[in-house]
Image: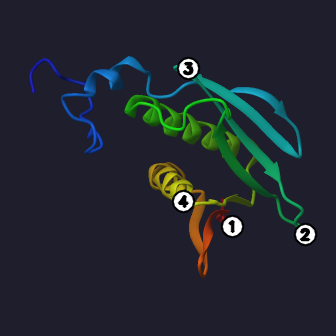
Amino acid sequence: MEGNAGRKEISLPSHIDDENIDEVVIYPIQHPIQWDRRTAKEWIGSCQIGDRQIEIFFTRLNSFGTSSWRVDFRKEKHQPKRGTVAETISILNSVISAIKEFLESVKPDRLQMSPTNTSREKLYRSVIRRIKPQIEQTYNITEKSYGTLFGEFILSRLNDV
C-alpha cells in the first residue's frame, strides 16, 4: 500500500466496532508498571489506567529446589467491576508486559496463574493466549485441571534455556 510503508496491520477483537473504536485510541496499548517492591520473595507493582488502579503481585512459593512463583493481579476494591473496552485491552497488555519483565529478570523455573472463578479463568486464558508467542522459546505453558474446581496455568522454564 502506498503511503503505509512500515505500518503493521493489526486485528482488533470482534467486540470492537465503529461505536467503540474511539475509546481504543484514547488509551495507550500498555501502561508502565511502577514497582513498589522487588525482593527474592515478592514483586509488587501497580499501574494507573484511566481512573482504575491495577495491582500485580508475584509471590515466591515454598518449593524444594526450584524457583516457583505465583502471579495475580486485581483492581482496587472500590473501583467499578467493568471498564471500557480500551481499559480492558490496556489492562491485559500491561499485565502481559509485567509478566514478561518478571520472566526476563527473575527467570523462574515455574510461574503459576490460578483462577478462582469462571470470569478470572477466561481472563487468565486470554493472558496466556496473548503471551504464548512471546515466551514459547523459553517457557512451556500447561493447563492443569482439578475436576470441578478451577485449574491453573503453569509456565515452566525449558531445560535448555
**Mark 3 → mark 2, Cα distance in angstroms:** 41 Å
77 and 67: which is toward the camera: 77
Q: Earlier in the sequence, mark 3 or mark 4?
A: 3
Q: Residues within 10 Å of mark 4 (few under 14, many from 20)?
A: some
Label 1, label 4: how far apart the Cα atoms are: 28 Å
Q: Which quarter of the image is occupied by the C terminus? A: bottom right
Q: Mark 2, mark 4: which one is toward the viewer?
A: 4
Give the distance between the C-alpha atoms of the residues marked 3 and 4, in whole angstroms: 24 Å
Residue ID for mark 3: 51
Kind of residue indicated by mark 1: Asn
Rounded to the nearest angstrom, the CA distance separating label 3 from label 1 is: 42 Å
| Quadrant in the picture for residue 76 | top right
- Which residue matches tag 2? 64
Q: Position of residue 140 (x, y in %)?
A: 58, 65
Compared with 157, 90 (above or below) is above
Residue situated in front as seen by the camera: 79 or 108: 79
